[in-house]
Image (tube, helix red, strand yellow):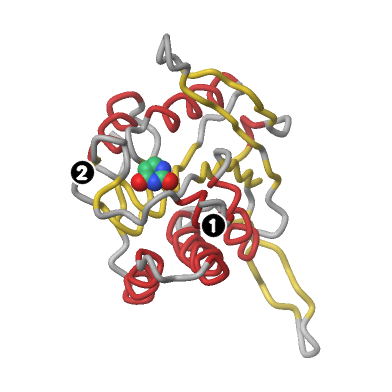
Amino acid sequence: MGKLFISEHPLIQHKMAMLRDKNTTTKEFKELITEITMLLTYEATRDLPLEDFEVETPIATAKCRRVAKEIVVVPILRAGIGMVDGVHSLLPAAKVGHIGIYRDPDTLMPVEYYCKVPKDMEKAKVLLVDPMLATGGTAKASIEFLKERGADEITLISIIAAPQGVKTVQQAFNDVDIYTAAYDSALNEHGYIVPGLGDAGDRMFGTK
Ligand code: URA
């Protein structure tokens, strides 16, 4: 089974309190999403492979190491877009894919309306980002899409995860780790995470 990492880092917990607050402005919300994503990305990239190389300092040659893995960040539309800057602040060379999926109200099957990812996904570590892991339906469909495109190293980063979403992902895939800043208790009848933070996309883009 993939790992569930719930960050207890004081900085993340402090920022989460501000993020959840209904009085937080759109500007602050966006900034907090970026900062928390950056801190979660730091944790999620702890096992990246390194290669040796040499750097000339002003004094001598230093034996150094650099990341030896291509990174692709894939936001799930729409709210995942708000997490891309946070990943890019640590991994500026990461390529960006996009996944747009909705659930057909009649069939309840996931429908892809916009999906574009870089070539050579099999060589990359993919950071799939979506702030809210609620039912896990979209995350599951997105991971299936990425695997069909050849991705075999996928990590899901969500700001808040609900038990149902974690269970859906973990039951479907045994090789996808989940990194989150909070593990909330439940979903309400509208599919919102409780206590959560409301609609992440609306709060991020000021559309509520
Ligand atoms: N998506 C959101 O934006 N918020 C939730 O609570 C659940 C899904």
Left or right: 197 with respect to 94?
left
Residue 125 in view in this figure: no
Secondary structure beneath dot 1 equals helix
Q: CA distance from mark 2 to mark 1?
A: 22 Å
What label does residue 204 carry, if any?
A: 1
Q: Which residue is mark 2?
A: 186
Front in this rendered view, residue 185 or 5: 185
The x, y position of residue 61, in whole percent, is 75, 78
What amino acid is labelled 2 in the image? Answer: Ala
What amino acid is labelled 1 in the image? Answer: Met
Q: Quadrant of the N terminus?
A: top left
The x, y position of residue 52, in whole percent, is 65, 61
Q: Which residue appears at 53% of the width and 45% of the height?
A: 127
Q: Which residue appears at 35% of the width and 59% of the height?
A: 181
Location of residue 116 (image quadrant): top right
Secondary structure beneath dot 2 equals strand
Left or right: 2 with respect to 186?
right
Q: Which residue appears at 43% of the width and 49% of the height?
A: 199
Between discs 2 and 1, the one toward the N terminus:
2
